[in-house]
Amino acid sequence: MSSRKIICAVSGKSYTFAKDYFDKKVTEYGDEDSLKKYFITRKVKGYLNKGYSVQEIRNIVSADDDSLPGADSQDMKDMIDMYSQFVEDKMITKGRERLIENALGLTGEAGEVSEKIKKLFRDNRIDDDAVLKELGDVLFYTVALSNIFGGSLVKIIELNMEKLNARVKNGTLQGSGDNR
């Protein structure tokens, strides 16, 4: 029998689950290895859903940095690779049709994010969870398109940071056009 000891990926705190609850969580995460790699507590999920960064949550819950994976850890890379494969497994279209479907999916989902935010101005309210779910859909299509072009989520982040840092350095962060 395997250990039912689980460590929260964000807080670093250790939990030992009762067998029934452990089995439920294994089903929720897909398999025991994924549960052990990516488990986060309800409390941490609540903070994430409210927009707190991982570092802010770690400060709030007084996480011990020695027990946490670094930003460049293999676990994070594995999670990104796993998500990329997750996206690939959901693809229905192929070739040119896939490119078009994924591009339209990205713009459609970005529009849905805007629709949710519009309600803040129109109705003076916003559903944070609904916005986050739509951003998840934007991420899905971003990764799908990145996969088509041989990229990865890490590569997209690196390229975007390089581009924006160059614009800051050149004093061209404001303005328009790709080559500023």
Image (cartoon, helix red, strand yellow):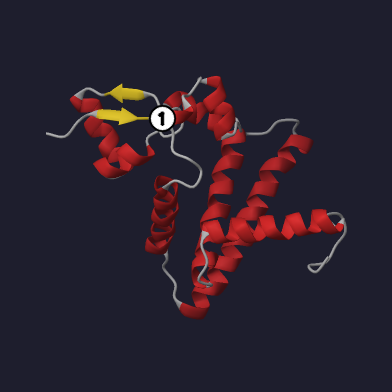
Residue tagged 1: 67
Residue 100 sits in which quadrant? bottom right
| Amino acid type, residue under disc 1 in the picture | Ser
Q: Position of residue 39 (x, y in %)?
A: 37, 35
49 displayed left or right of 113: left
Question: Considering only vertical position in the picture, is 11 above or below 90?
Answer: above
| Element at label 1 | helix
Question: Considering only vertical position in the picture, is 87 above or below 44?
Answer: below
112 displayed left or right of 17: right
Q: Position of residue 28 (x, y in %)?
A: 31, 39
Q: Position of residue 26 (x, y in %)?
A: 26, 38
Q: Position of residue 176 (x, y in %)?
A: 85, 62
Q: Quadrant of the N terminus?
A: top left
Residue 40 sits in which quadrant? top left
Q: How many marks?
A: 1
- Residue 49 visible in the shown view: no
Outermost front residue: 66
The residue that appears at 19% across and 26% down in the rendered structure is 19
Outermost left residue: 1
Question: Considering only vertical position in the picture, is 99 above or below 65?
Answer: below
Question: Considering only vertical position in the picture, is 146 above or below 50?
Answer: below
The residue that appears at 52% across and 79% down in the rendered structure is 96
Classed neighbour count for the residue bearing mark 1: other residues with Cα under 10 Å, few (<14), some (14–19), many (≥20): some
- Residue 84 visible in the shown view: yes
Q: Nearer the viewer, residue 51 or 159?
A: 159
Q: Nearer the viewer, residue 157 or 117?
A: 157
17 displayed left or right of 112: left
102 displayed left or right of 27: right
